[in-house]
Image: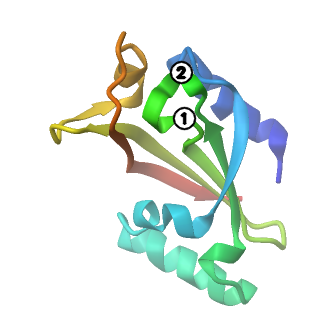
């Protein structure tokens, strides 16, 4: 994994989310498959790469920005961009909007959530696929 290339998106995410700890956090590809499945083309590409690697989604490690404790109920969650290493120098980079669904069902961007003075006790993280590329 080329961490130098990954640090720029982390820095951008950090500037957008001023209170985010710029820590990396790992998760399995299986955790972000709902994001992958937002595009039938990406889903097909990922399933082809998995088949070629002889792996299943839980075997693939992805990296994202890990949220700090100041994000209340979202603390320790991983957010986009994601970088997933399929092995054999094949890496998938996924860009997505980070959305927070509030208890009332409304969704706001994570940047808006970070600006709330009082964080709700319940909130869920969701993603909206923007783009991806393979390296």
Answer with left or right where residue 112 lies relative to residue 3: left
Residue 104: % across, % down: 15, 37
Task: Name the residue tied to disc 1.
Answer: 75
Residue 87: % across, % down: 81, 71
Answer with left or right where residue 107 lies relative to residue 43: left
Q: Residue at x 42, y 72 (%)?
A: 41
Indicate the quadrant where residue 11 lies.
top right
Label disc, if present, on residue 70 of the rendered structure? 2
Label 1 neighbourhood size at 10 Å, few (<14), some (14-19), many (20+)?
few
80 over 134 or under it: above or below = above
Residue 73: % across, % down: 44, 35
Q: Residue at x 66, y 24 (%)?
A: 21
SS type, badge 1: loop
Q: Nearer the viewer, residue 106 or 120?
A: 120
Q: Quadrant of the N terminus?
A: bottom right
Answer whether labels 1 and 2 touch (C-beta < 8 Å): yes
C-alpha distance separating marks 1 and 2: 7 Å
């Amino acid at each position: 994994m080329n961490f130098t290339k990954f640090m720029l998106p982390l820095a951008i995410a950090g500037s957008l989310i001023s209170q985010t700890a710029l820590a990396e956090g790992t998760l399995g590809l299986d955790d972000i498959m709902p994001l992958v499945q937002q595009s039938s083309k990406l889903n097909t590409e990922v399933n082809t790469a998995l088949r070629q690697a002889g792996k299943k989604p839980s075997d693939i490690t992805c990296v994202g920005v890990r949220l700090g404790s100041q994000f209340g109920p979202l603390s320790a969650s991983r957010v986009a961009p994601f970088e997933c290493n399929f092995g054999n120098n094949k890496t998938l980079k996924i860009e997505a909007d980070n959305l927070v669904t509030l208890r009332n069902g409304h969704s706001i961007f994570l940047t808006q959530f970070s600006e709330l003075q009082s964080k709700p006790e319940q909130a869920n993280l969701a993603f909206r696929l923007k783009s991806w590329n393979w390296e």
